Amino acid sequence: MRIVQILIASVCAIALSQPALAGCKKEIKETRELIERDKDQYTLVARNKASADLLSAEAKLIDLNPMLDLDCLKMVRKAKAELRKGKKKENKD
């Protein structure tokens, strides 16, 4: 009986986390598109660091960590922060 309860709880936890997975996957995709679309606005170092953070975010999705949505979104926010920090200055002539 205890095994059945654990199994049901696990299935419920996975089902509840699916929308968060989709949200984080969407954030990763949008951030990658931003990097590719506006790559001339960011330094190479910032783009590389952001890409590495996005890879870490994807790894969090694969991990069976119950807090995976928070960990994933945290890494996406870190990637976006790297991009902001590495934004090239515009020359005003």
Image: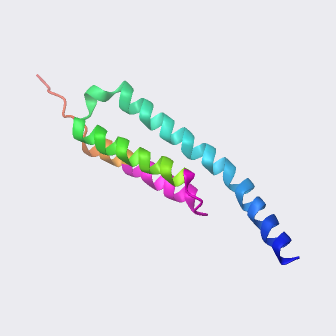
Residue 57: in sight, yes or no? yes
Q: Would residue 42 be found to the left or right of residue 28 on screen?
A: left
Please report the residue visible at 19 percent of the width from the left and 29 percent of the height from the top: 90
Tell me where residue 33 sits by quadrant. Answer: top left
Question: Of all residues shown, which one is farthest toward the top?
Answer: 93
Q: Nearer the viewer, residue 33 or 56?
A: 56
- Percent from the top left, x then y, of residue 79? 37, 46
The image shows residue 91, relative to residue 56, as above or below, that is above
- The picture quadrant where one finds residue 4 is bottom right
Q: Is residue 43 visible?
A: no
**Residue 35 in the image, given as x and y percentages of width and height:** 36, 32
| Residue at screen point 74% across, 64% down | 10
Residue at the outermost bottom position:
2
Q: Quadrant of the C terminus?
A: top left
Q: Residue at x 56, y 51 (%)?
A: 62
Magenta stretch: dominant secondary structure? helix
Percent coordinates x, y for residue 91 in the rendering: 14, 27
Q: Residue furthest right?
A: 1
Give the residues in magenta: 62-78
Q: Quadrant of the N terminus?
A: bottom right
Residue located at (34% from left, 48% from top): 81
Is 47 covered by the magenta stretch?
A: no
Q: How many marks?
A: 0
Q: How is the image coloured?
A: rainbow
